[in-house]
Amino acid sequence: MSNSSSITQFLLVAFADTRELQLLHFGLFLGIYLAALLGNGLIIMAIACDHRLHTPMYFFLLSLSVLDLGSISTTVPKSMVNSLWDMRAISYAGCAAQVFLFVFFISAEYFLLTVMSYDRYVAICK
């Protein structure tokens, strides 16, 4: 008889065990998430609506805001749901998707910041 087991879900470590601290965690993360959504949404809306801001520097800022929305929307909502509903499990596919998307958005942000710094370097030196 062979030992064959498969992983279907992972158990996450909770930030707190008491319900009051879990609700505080949810409220704090909800505030941070909404502030990030509002701030990045305002940047996106301002750049998209004003035609004077359609320059390369503002295009980079628009792209950076979109990537920031993607990276914060990858991890924070699952953490808030786990805190609110007192759950500690994430599926294997969900974990893999979360890790892939988070690494993608963070690496794209680093790449974009590198391009932005090179753009500023060229603008200053030339």
Image (cartoon, rainbow, N blue to C red):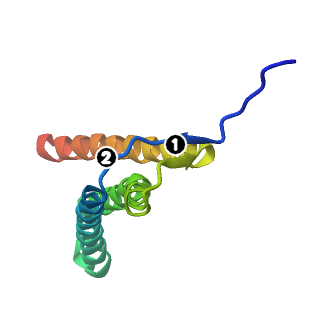
Q: Quadrant of the N terminus?
A: top right
Q: Is residue 90 above or below residue 62?
A: above
Where is residue 125? Give x, y as percent: 13, 40
Q: Which residue is mark 2?
A: 15
User: In the rendered structure, which amino acid carries the disc numbered 1?
Assistant: Phe
Mark closer to the chain start, 2 or 1: 2
Where is residue 115? Give x, y as percent: 30, 43
User: In the rendered structure, which amino acid carries the disc numbered 2?
Assistant: Phe
User: Number of callouts in the render?
Assistant: 2
Residue pictured at 42% horizontal, 48% vertical: 105
**Foreground residue, 61 or 11?**
11
Left or right: where does residue 48 sit relative to residue 8?
left
Residue pictured at 54% horizontal, 44% vertical: 95
**Foreground residue, 57 or 12?**
12
Binning the other alpha carbons within 10 Å of mark 2 as few (below 14), some (14 to 19) or many (20 upward) gives: few
Q: Which residue is mark 1?
A: 100
Name, please, the residue furthest toward the top: 1
Contact flag, marks 2 and 1 (Cβ < 8 Å): no
Name, please, the residue furthest toward the right: 1
Where is residue 82? Give x, y as percent: 43, 56
Left or right: where does residue 38 sit relative to residue 87?
left
Left or right: where does residue 47 sit relative to residue 125?
right
SS for callout 1: helix
SS for callout 2: loop
Dividing the picture into quadrants, the one containing residue 7 is top right
Q: Quadrant of the C terminus?
A: top left
Residue pictured at 20% horizontal, 42% vertical: 122
**Foreground residue, 69 or 82?**
82
